Amino acid sequence: MTHRIVIVGGGAGGLELATLLGNKAGKRGQAEITLVDANMTHLWKPRLHEVAAGVLNADVDELNYVAHAQRHRFKFIMGRMNGLDRQGKEVILEAHVVEGEQILPERRLGYDTLVIAIGSNTNDFGTQGAAEHCIFLDKRSAAETFHRKFLNKYLKANQDPSADPKHCSIAIVGAGATGVELAAELNHSAHELVEYGFDQIKPENLTITIIEAADRVLPVLSEKASAAILRQLNELNIKVLTGEMVTEITADGLHTKSGKFVPAFLKVWSAGIKAPDFLHGIAGLESNRINQLVVKATLQTTRDDDVFAFGDCAQCPRHDADTPVPPRAQSAHQQAKLLAKSLQRRLAGKPLLTFEYQDKGSLISLSKNGSVGNIMGNLSKDFTFEGKLARFMYITLYRMHQFTLHGVFRTLLLILRDRINRRASPTLKLH
Ligand SMILES: Cc1cc2nc3c(=O)[nH]c(=O)nc-3n(C[C@H](O)[C@H](O)[C@H](O)COP(=O)(O)OP(=O)(O)OC[C@H]3O[C@@H](n4cnc5c(N)ncnc54)[C@H](O)[C@@H]3O)c2cc1C
């Protein structure tokens, strides 16, 4: 029987792995590759803040799994994993129900090798009111909800200027990449909206506040990079409160431990991650306090050599540090590339490769505007640069993902499509 490799999660890492394996082992008939995802389409997660700010139309940028699978010799199954039977070697997919109608029943999917790459969700650390009042920017639907609410605020203000306040306050918890990039994109959108005639809320009347518990923005970057980002946020008129722990969130705003209150109409929580709850101790596998499956350097889970995990949902050791591999797109990308080679070796009966994370630094996009710089910070080298070169390198990260998925020719076509769209379509999604 052909070896069955099942990959659950078609995100930044899982989709790359399925594509690379499909192109090789799938094409040669060495293995049957199946990708499972809870959705029918893929959108690269680091672009979610652009969807929220309306600078990216997710409908244009999404990738359809069915069509992609057909092209790259793997099978796609739509389904949400909610359990695992390790003895029977089966993944359990929950029933798919839409508006009360069961479209697909609960299913069991057999595997010889299982790879879990289901990413992470936002971790609000149980903060009072966060789940109720904040938007967690970890899914496309959440980013679209944010965009709709943001746009509706401008629509209402424009429709009846006397009835609605001409001021809009947004609070973002967490000054990591997501929070900082979202704030910068929103500032950019505020200027664009005025150009489109939504001029009742002036850019200077959009108050964006980032609240961070650490003593500086982007605490994972070098102090130099962090200071440069703060300077640029200040230039954009974005308020930053550091050393402030959010203790409660209400419909009207956020309370901090030091007694401050930040009023906000829209509240976003982007201060931490955790793997989906159902992974915690699933089928006896080892997991950590944020539900990540603990894996060895081969990306095999510690208690079952046939079950692999990588990306945000895995705790993977680093060869050069005591801390685990960070939950980033570049980690998932590097792991997918290694695993594609490693699993082919496994099929050929050869030993597995071990993963060594290469920190390529971090690029933070502070909006599209060329006059607003971008920064690369690397803890080991403390090499910081800004401006158009950094902007170019930031975009390259996404193009590398597309390149892995589509190859050179189609990626060039997609770049051309994006250029045409930029000329032919509005610069903001206005609905
Ligand atoms: C707004 C934002 C900005 C970011 N910016 C950056 C950045 O600039 N640079 C960087 O390196 N990283 C960035 N990140 C982090 C980066 O997106 C993640 O580290 C990366 O996407 C992790 O890849 P992954 O493959 O592990 O998971 P994901 O890309 O999240 O993919 C998980 C996939 O699993 C599917 N799935 C989830 N649960 C199930 C289930 N139960 N059953 C079946 N399928 C399931 C999902 O639909 C999804 O397709 C950002 C994240 C966010 C939210």
Image (cartoon, helix red, strand yellow):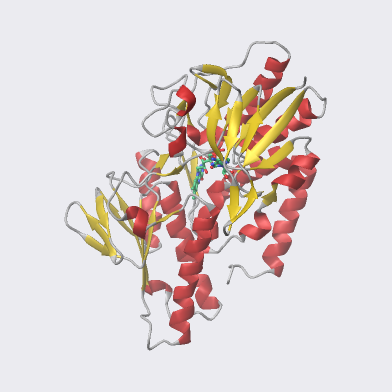
Q: Position of residue 150 (x, y in %)?
A: 46, 69
The picture quadrant where one finds residue 351 is top right
Query: Quadrant of the rendered structure where residue 68 is?
Result: top right
312 sits to left or right of 172: right
Q: How many numbered tags mark residues here?
A: 0
The quarter of the image holding the C terminus is: bottom right
- Residue under the point 46% across and 68% down: 149
Residue furthest to the left? 259
Quadrant including the N terminus: top right
* Left or right: 325 as drawn, with respect to 259: right
Q: Nearer the viewer, residue 183 or 67?
A: 67
Residue 422 lies in what quarter of the image?
bottom right
Of residues 117 and 178, which is closer to you in this image? Answer: 117
Q: Nearer the viewer, residue 294 or 405?
A: 294
Please report the residue visible at 49 percent of the width from the left and 17 percent of the height from the top.
303
**Residue at 40% across, 46% down:** 176
The answer to whether one can see residue 338 in this image is no
Q: Position of residue 54 (x, y in %)?
A: 55, 64
Camera-side residue of 230 and 99? 99
Query: Residue 283 at what x, y percent from top left?
Result: 48, 25
Residue, far right: 28
Asked if 160 appears above or below 236 in the picture, the reply is below
Residue, x 61% and y 67% (percent of image)?
A: 427
Could you tell me residue 253's position as x and y percent? 29, 63
